[in-house]
Structures are given as structure tokens and as C-alpha cells.
Amino acid sequence: MLPVVVLDASLFPPHAPYESCSPSSRSILVSEGERDTAKFLPYADEPTFPAKRHLAKFAHLEWEEKFDPDSEMIQLETAWRLCMAHKLSLNDINRMSIIKAIRTSHNSGLLWDGQQRDFLHWPGASQINVKGGLLENWVPQEDDLHGRLTSMLRISCPIINCLLPMCSTHAYPFSSYLPSKKPWITGESMRLSEGNPCGQDCFRLVADIEKYAESLPPPSDEVDQVSLADNLSVILGIAPDLFPCQSSVLCFKSCKEIFVKHLQLFPDNVILPLDRELSTALSTDGESGTERGTKQGKKKKKNRPLVQYCMLDPCAHPGPCTTATCQCYLNKMHCWPACKCGLSCVRQWPACTCQKCEDVSCPCVLGKRECVPGVCVRCDAGKKNPCSNTRMQRQDSKLIEVKTGSYGLGAFATEDMAVDAFLGTYVGHILSNNAAEHTSEIMAHNGHNYLFEFSVDAEIFDAAQVGNQTRFLNHRGNGMDNVDASSKLVNGEHQIGFFTKRRVDAGEELFLDYGLNYWLHHGGKRCLGDEGTVAGGEKDSEVIFEKSPLASVDDIA
């Protein structure tokens, strides 16, 4: 029998009111539709909250959206009959625009809306449930490799920092464009290359490949033969220099048969090695190396900012990124690893030639961007012992403890930290400037501001409802802060990272200078001798917001 211990709850002081926040290691992009729609009314039971003024900023109210169940059932029946009886595809039905879009994303559209409610049975209906065969036609057939690849590309985030299906950080759906690359290795070079045969049917063991090709049956219209040619063309379009030994495993055919198909798709006389030389001679402005050198000798080189913030989707188009078809070219931006042009594109950031990348002599460090795996190979950016300029993409941060600090909850070091120790990246909802204004009444009511912006007219992070441990960094100014914020280009994506400014002892609280912009424009009250919350080492009782700035990274000391 275990002894019963009775505790008097009145002896324990209650915890101070605290706004809940869902922990997350990734930021969440808020779409335009979600930004303009009020999902609920915060602080509805508190009379001091200006509810009418807050709701007036939204174009739509979630609970006032008009919904007609009869109209939805009629549209579902229309879609079913067009698809099942008249054999129209879902894409064709969408293009007709006679009913609501059947599927706009994984969680929106007519099919999704219908599955959120009980199916209504009515006389004359052909369907017995909301699916009714419609969803089956949306999935590509098993032998349609191109359709399966493009369907996966639409939901798979190409950003190296993610590489996840249906990523919540970047815009969905993604481009399904499959680039078609030119091969550099001829069939004769493959035959003369060194290597062991993959088996008794390896192309290396065929003495006369032309004679073997003549012995094969002529092309037929059978499904398996057509799918083999289509699938092989898709595979070689992505990796044209793939050896038959490898592509035979993917196509479930003999190596020598695949080699014959490879020669039919890419004859040796169409593989021109001069194409590589011409492409590498192009500059990021689309000029040849000779022309660029001549022009640079005549006019002064323009000074451009090291890091320019611009939200662009990865480019996806045929041809080089030297024409108006490339949005990176139009916006005078570098391509990034997620672009479909590949790492060999002339608009990609150049690789550094360092081995450690620890100082400003490294062009990546000087340009405020992290080294790119697969590009910066000398510093071992993507291998076992990567350089220190890859900490943000690897999330190689020090452990932070959150507990009661100088102002509410604070962040504390759990170990001794040297100068420039990485503490983590700022995480939250990604908002526009207009959407951030929707939170002004909430911030004024609860006294908390978790907004953080890159620069003027840029995207803003809001860690009020979603965030990580960095949201608990309190303010301390007058040079008494020990943490600095820095914006870096991480594999083409701008992120805000926090680094120690000096040596920090274990158990010491971590402070960030919020910057003058926060206190002048976003609700904070200054105290004597400081733009922040500390004056002479004492707490300022008039401070409204206790942590997490809406301040430009450029304004932070």
C-alpha cells in the first residue's frame, strides 16, 4: 500500500497568464486567402478587446461564408456524370468552368469540401458517396511514368532546406516541369569506358551492337513496348548520361536492349561537346565571355548589394537562363539550387574555393550566404565534416533553456558558448506587411509582439502562435545584449539566424537588442537612457511588449 501524500494547492502561486504557442522547427506560409479571412474572434469574452475594429480589417469571415448544400450536391452529380458517363477528365471539367474547381490543392476544391460533410442522398442521384469514382481518375496510371513524376513534383518541395511533400513553408503546388537535358557521353564512349559487366546481358559483352539491334523485333503498338520507350525517354531526359547498366534496373529490361534504345534516342552524331564550352562561356547577363570582358574594360563595374531580398519561385523553363523566359533573369537575380536549370547554370552563385570558410575572405561569407552542398565542394559543404558556414541549413544550434527570465519567460544558455555560437533561426507564420497589420489589435490587447521582418516591404515572421525557442529572447540595449541577429541566404532562401556576440556562460540569460525601429513604430515605450526595457540594470515597469521585435535585421546593432 503506497502512502498517500496530500498537497495544499493554495500554497503554490498560480502561473502568470501565458499565450499558447505551437512549437515548430519550420515557418508556415499563410496564403493570400487565409490572410484575408478571419478564422475566429480572439478574446471574444473580453469586453476590452476592440472586436469590431479587428474584424473590419478582414475581407471575409469564416463563419459567414455562404454555403448551399443543394448546390454542392448538384455540382458533384454534374462532375460525376461528365467524368463517368461522358469520359471527360477532371482537368477538362475544370477548364469548362461550369462548376466549382474540382480540386485546387490537397485540401481545397469541390471534392475536398464534399468530403468534409455527410453525403446527402437525393432521388435521381447517380452517386452513393462523394468519391464515386472521381478520385481514381486523378491518379496517373501505373505505366505512366511521366504522369507519376509530374504528379509528385507538384506536391514535392524542391527547396533543399525542405525536400518534403506538401511543404507548409513554401507555396503549393510546385512546378511539374521536367527539364530535358542533353547528353555529353556518346554511346561509343560508354562502350570504351572502364567497368565490369553488370551481367550476361550487359551491353559491354555485345561485340556488334548494330547486328544485335537488327535481331530485335520491330517496334510494335503493344502497351509494354510503348511504355518502355516512353519511360526510358523520361529517365534519359532527366539523366541523359545514365549508363544502360543503371537504367535497365529502372526499366526492368536487359542492359543491351536498353543500350539500343539509348542509341536510338541519342545517336552519337547529335552529341556535340562544343555545347558545354559555349554554355560555360556565358555570363549571368547572357553575354559571351569575350563580349563581357570587352565591355568590362570600357565601363565601370556597378556596385550591387551583397544580399537582395526577393521572393521568387524557382525558375522552370526550357533553354538557358539568359532570356526573358527566366524570371531570375528578368528580376536580375541569381538562380538558386531549387531552380530546374540545375547547379551547372551560369546564373547560379559561384562556388567558393575555401577549405574552412571561417572569415570574410570566403565569398559566401562576404555575400551573407551559406555554402551550397554540391557546389562548394572544397569546404566539404555537404559531407561528413562541413564548414561552419552551413550551420543554419543543418540546424546545428546550441541548446537553449526557456524559463522565467528578466521579463516573463526568457532564453538561457545551457552550456558555455564561444563567440559566434549559433542559437537557431527565427520561426513563425510568414505574413505580408498588410497581413501583419491585422494583428495590431491583438498585440495591443495582450501586450506581446512577436513580429520580425527582413526589411521594408518584405515578408514578416509572426511567432505569436507558431515558433521555437528563439521567440523567448528578451531585449537589452546600451551594448548590454549578447546575441546578434543576421539575415543569410540559405540555399536560396532568406532566413534570420541568431549568434552570440561574445562569450556566454552556462545559465546566463540571452538578450537581443530589438533596435530603434521596434520602439518608435511598433508599440514599445522607451525608458530613460535606453530605447529598450533596461535602464541602469533595473526593469522598466512601463514597457508594453516584453519580447520579440518587429524590427528590420538591418536596424539591429
Image (cartoon, grey):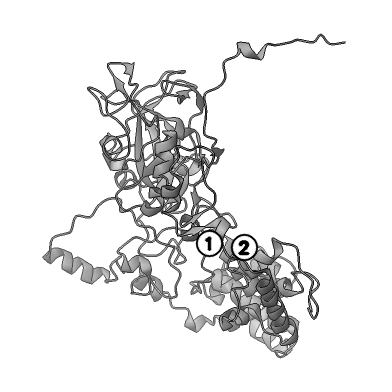
Q: Which mark is residue 172?
A: 1
Residue 333, horizontal then vertical, whole percent: 32, 61
Label 1's element?
Answer: loop
* Location of the N terminus (image quadrant): top right
Number of residue marks: 2
Question: Which is nearer the N-term, disc 1 or disc 2?
Answer: 2
* Location of the C terminus (image quadrant): top left
The answer to whether the residue labelled 1 contacts the one labelled 2, judged by CB atoms less than 8 Å apart, is yes
Q: Taking 355 as reference, is 245 above or below it?
A: below
Q: Amino acid at mark 1?
A: Tyr
Quadrant of residue 472 within the rendered picture: top left
Residue 351, horizontal then vertical, whole percent: 37, 53
Q: Nearer the viewer, residue 251 or 48?
A: 48
- In the visual, does 371 lie left or right of 535? right
Judging by the rendered image, the residue that carries numbered circle 2 is 106
Q: Amino acid at mark 2?
A: His
Q: Residue lying farthest front?
A: 47
Q: Which mark is residue 90?
A: none
